[in-house]
Image (cartoon, grey):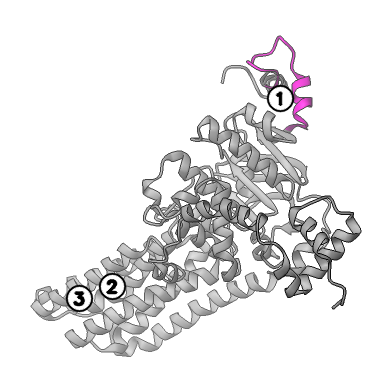
Amino acid sequence: MRAVGAEEVAPTSHPWEIQADGLVVRVGGRRGRNAVNELTLRLGRGVHGLLGPNGAGKTTLIRTLATVQKPSAGSLSLLGTPLGGSAGLRKLRRKLGYLPQHFGYYKRFTVREFVEYLAWLKEMPPETIPGAVQRALEKVGLADRADDRLKTLSGGMVRRVGIAQAIVNDPEVLLLDEPTVGLDPAQRLRFRELVVELGQQSCVLISTHLVEDVAAACSDVVLVAEGSLVFQGTPADLVAAGTEDHVGDSPIERGYSALINAAPGQGGGW
Amino acid sequence: MTAHHPGEQLLRQYARGDDIPADRLWAVEAHLEGCAPCRGRLDPDPIAEQVWADLAPVLDRTPQMPRARSWLRHVSHWVSPVAGPWLAMILLVTAVAVALDQAGSVARGQISLVLLVAPVLPVLGVAASWGRAMDPAYELTSATPRAGLPLVFRRTVAVLAVVVPGLLVASLVTGASLTRWMLPCLAFTTCTLALGGLIGITRAALTLIAGWAAGIVLPTIALSRTSVALDVAAAPVWAAVLAAALIVIAVRFRTQSRSS
């Protein structure tokens, strides 16, 4: 059993885990574009699916929420801490979990060493690190490969190492950018169970292009196009938006294409 | 502790997991917690035996944690995991510079190559520790609370801990005076960090190395005479540069830590 700190049992003083108002994120320097454009979003506890076409600004939004990318305008609060200056940034980052889309790692490290190193970077108390690492590896089903070098793992296993490092500090805000890429169907089912479990305690935001992942695991769907919010609601609401005339193999896909095609500036084609 | 111990029959029922009224069950449980003799009276079988029988094969299969590479953990807290080959390269460059100096091949021994490369060697190490292009886990690292100046300082100290002893040995072998390279070396390192805060560490390192090569190394080799910048008389200037860079870093650190 680990000790429970006073901070963990303190009542939450913020209404939303993630709160963005008129958020603008400009990428690509002077001649760049607004990857996130006037986005207003409120997310609480639970599993939220972030859907949108390629180039809709999903990754930029996740990077901004992970405090890697700075917002250009608008306001953004995470766990009640306003981002902008670096006020409280360090404390906030201890409660974040982040899996980037392109997950880079050190090939020579073993799975356990790598997750331990990330736990150290997240400033976890040293005495809690070995136990937390073991728990995280068990959750992603890699406990039996814990002492293998990362370079010997398959793509799906590396992705699971990425999930393990994201959840090792029991984050209150968990940001996963395309976490199911490279996972086989059985692993994806296991992953959905895991995020549903994590969503009980924290705010999980999953960026994905797999609509069925959202339908199965998410309590809430966020649809973005051209950097702006198009739709926010339950998967059932998304299904209700589609009719038989819309493109798609499943009701939820038809709902997705109905909303995306209705969004301004979205033609057909790709 | 209470003087009333549960009777034999009640205890047997408890051990079997029988349906005991909740108030009596709590009483037995609370009593057992505090009374070792009564715990001893609990029939060990069948429950404990059963639990153990279920557990033993699992325990045999549970892999033990090897702790063979605990040194790696200590090293990686200071040195960036990708900087190892770079530090090896820096030491190699130092050795080559010493060898060339000993052979007297550069301008017939008029110029010390060790002096010429010493200031920029740690810059390479700092760039390797913090370069976005060189660190595959840069994106992950930069989202962690330890990212920022504290980690930059740790990694810089680690780089200096490797580079400075190497240069010390080199200057002992070649007879180059300590004051002539130590201050430029530290000044360049701190300038990289100060400039890196504005334009990124990799770009800052490249700018400084290019500036050094164009401003000092080329004229020195062309004119076959050691630049005035590496003279002992230039030491106050280097000390001033070092102090200015430290102030820039300190101001940045204060604005960051004050608000965090």
**Amino acid at circle 1:** Pro
Residue B228 seen: no
- Name the residue carrying label 3: B113
Nearer the observer, A181 or B111:
A181
Residue A239 sits inside the magenta stretch: yes
Nearer the observer, A101 or A198:
A198
**Farthest residue, direction front:** B8
**Amino acid at circle 3:** Leu
Q: Are marks 2 and 1 in contact (CB under 8 Å)?
A: no
Nearer the observer, A86 or A108:
A108
Q: Are marks 3 and 1 on the same chain?
A: no
Q: Earlier in the sequence, mark 3 or mark 2?
A: 3
- Cα separation, mark 2 vs mark 1, equals 58 Å
Q: At 29% from the left edge and 88% from the top edge, which residue is drawn? A: B178
- Name the residue carrying label 2: B216
- Cα separation, mark 3 vs mark 1, equals 64 Å
The segment highlighted magenta reads: A230-252
Q: Is the residue B66 above or below the residue B20 in the image?
A: below
Residue A85 sits inside the magenta stretch: no
| Figure quadrant of residue A254 | top right
Residue A194 horizontal/vertical position (percent): 63, 42
| Numbered tag placed on residue A264 in the rendering | 1
Residue A121 horizontal/vertical position (percent): 54, 63
